[in-house]
Structures are given as structure tokens and as C-alpha cells.
Image (cartoon, rainbow, N blue to C red):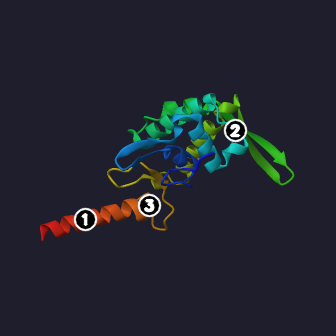
Amino acid sequence: MSADPRPLTGEPLALDLLNTRWMQDGAAQDLLTATDGLAVWLAATGLDRRFTADAPTLRHTLEARDALAAAVDGPPGAGVAPVDAVLEHGRIRATLTAEGPGERPEFDDSSWGPAWLATRDYLGLLATAPDRIRGCAHESCVLHFFDTSRNGTRRWCSMASCGNRAKASRHYARSKEN
């Protein structure tokens, strides 16, 4: 399996799925064009222990990514129906474990597992802090992040890349004016 080529990883599952699309040197990149890329994403998120990178799982994961993109980037309410359509393929089962009460996701078909879990994660982010779900402020970046900064003012997917590019652009513009 190849290494994860994405510039931003480790975000909550829903946003990590959105970040399987990114820009590199002005060209759109997509990790999920084939099952090999799905295998990379499943491994990066730890889902490879429970799910297989096959064609049905890829198809359902792409459906979830499109639904999440509509919900996060579209006009208010645009993602409701597509997100609900993905969520219809699973449910949470209440359980009792040796440690106490628990929950276990169940799917009508295991190939819906990664898609359903990412979509369910989005509901958790909405319940926690919907205003902290952000897209990078750089005009040519399409990445998303969950702002965990203390004061909630993070603007860039990465200060090292997009933040630096924005600062360099501003500096260059100021130097051209003088």
C-alpha cells in the first residue's frame, strides 16, 4: 500500500473524508479514484481493520463524501437529504458491556460502514460546535478542518502551507506598492 499523499490528515472522520480531495500545484487531486486510494484512506483512519477496500465500499464512500460536501460547502439545507440517505444504511445499537453501557454501529451492508461512520461523525461535529467546522481561508485550497484553537480563530488548514502562502502574497503586494 502506498503512503497517504494528502497534505492534511488527522481531522475528524467526516472532514478527513472531505479532505480526500485537495489541490496540488493548481491541479485537483482525488485519493478516491480507485480502491487503492480507498485502502490508503481506510488505513489512515484505522477503518481498514473492519472494512474492505472494494468497489461497493468505494461507491458508498464517494456518495457520503458528496453528501458531506453538500452539507458543509453548499447552501443551508442542501445536504440534508443526501446525508439522511447515507444514514439510512445504518444505526446505533445500544449495548451493555463489561465496562457498562455502550453503543455499536450496525449496517444493513458492511460496505456502507465507512460512509455511514463518516456521515454520523458529521452529526457529532454539528452537535459539538457547528461553527468550528471550517474550510481553509486560502482561495485555492479546498481542505476542511475542525477548529480546536482556544479562541476559535483558526483560518488555515495549515499555517505552514496555506497560511504562509497568504502571508507571502500580502508581503509581495505591499512591496509592489512601495
- Distance from disc 1 to disc 2, alpha carbons, whole Å, reads 45 Å
Give the structural element (helix, strand or loop) at label 3. loop
Q: Residue furthest left?
A: 178
Crowd band around label 3 with a 10 angstrom C-alpha radius: few (<14), some (14–19), many (20+)? some
Crowd band around label 1 with a 10 angstrom C-alpha radius: few (<14), some (14–19), many (20+)? few
Q: From the image, tell me which residue sits under label 3.
A: 158
Among the 4 quarters of the image, the one containing residue 117: top right
Q: Amino acid at mark 1?
A: Arg
Above or below for 96 versus 152: above
Does any portion of residue 154 appear in the rendered image?
A: no
Q: Residue furthest right?
A: 98
Among the 4 quarters of the image, the one containing residue 171: bottom left
Does any portion of residue 39 appear in the rendered image?
A: yes
Q: From the image, tell me which residue sits under label 2.
A: 51
- Distance from disc 3 to disc 1, alpha carbons, whole Å, reads 17 Å
- Taking the spot 60% from the left edge, 34% from the top edge, the residue there is 87
Q: From the image, tell me which residue sits under label 1.
A: 170
Image position, residue 135 (x, y; %): 41, 51
- Taking the spot 49% from the left edge, 47% from the top edge, the residue there is 19
- Taking the spot 50% from the left edge, 39% from the top edge, the residue there is 68
Image position, residue 108 (x, y; %): 70, 28
Among the 4 quarters of the image, the one containing residue 110: top right
Above or below for 108 versus 99: above
Give the structural element (helix, strand or loop) at label 1. helix
Numbered badge on residue 120: none
Image position, residue 116 (x, y; %): 62, 37
